[in-house]
Image: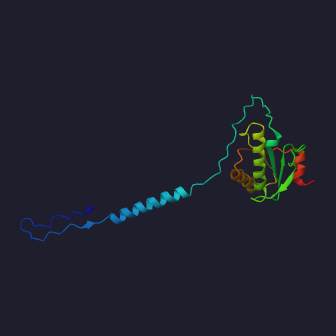
Amino acid sequence: MAELNTGDGGGGKDKKVRSKKQNSKVDLTAMVDLAFLLITFFMLTTTLSKPKAMELGLPDKEDPKQKNVDIKVDENRTMTILLGKDNKLVRYVGLLATPVAGGAPKEFAYGKEGIRKELLSRKASVLAYSTAKGKPKNGMIVIIKPSKKSNYRNLVDILDEMGIVEVPTYAIVNEFTPEETKLLEGK
């Protein structure tokens, strides 16, 4: 509590005797409560206003002295998704020249009835294929190739689908072969 000292109010020599004034007391509890409420409010709002970003693991920068070694991956495990202009999405399984059975280039829509359904069915077939080969931990590998004409929203949507379907391995590659460019342009 805070107190104000106002003197004793008594008389000395030859002075009139005055009655002693009582000390005034200021109650600060309401002000302390308000201070704690404001601190709590601002701490909460700063916590909620922090930007939330999608985690994206990128490889380390390549050492120019180190030789690039190509890694062979089973064609049955790979799916390539091409992102084009006007929300166009094309997928193929294996190599474009020699796609795996049922993996010929096909256009899909975004969402659960489009590419998500395809990713789920392909993931199940890759798991069955890997289990038959004796390597049940080998999952599907998805290569995402956004074109320069695709928009950022399409890439975010595909990355969301990778998270929903729980695809363990995927890569974003911005290199297109001439055949893939023709496929996206519909020629």
Residue beneath the point at 89% across and 51% down: 183
| Residue situated in front as seen by the camera: 157 or 132 | 132
Residue sitting farthest toward the right: 187
Left or right, 86 with reference to 139: right
Q: Position of residue 82 (x, y in %)?
A: 82, 50
Q: Nearer the viewer, residue 43 or 82?
A: 82
Could you tell me which residue is drawn at 52 percent across and 57 percent down?
Answer: 46
Q: Tell me where residue 79 appears, x and y as whole percent.
A: 80, 46
Where residue 152 appears, as percent x and y from the top left, is 74, 54
Residue 57, quarter of picture: top right
- Closer to the camera in the image, 64 or 95: 95
Q: How is the image coloured?
A: rainbow
Using the image as rendered, state which of residue 89 and residue 178 is in the foreground: 89
Asked if one can make out residue 94 in the rendered structure from this viewpoint, the answer is yes
Q: Is residue 141 visible?
A: no
Compared with residue 119, is residue 7 higher up or lower down, i.e. above or below?
below
Residue at left 80%, top 35%? Answer: 72
Classify residue 23 as left or right of residue 152: left
100 lies above or below 107: above
- The residue that appears at 21% across and 66% down in the rendered structure is 23
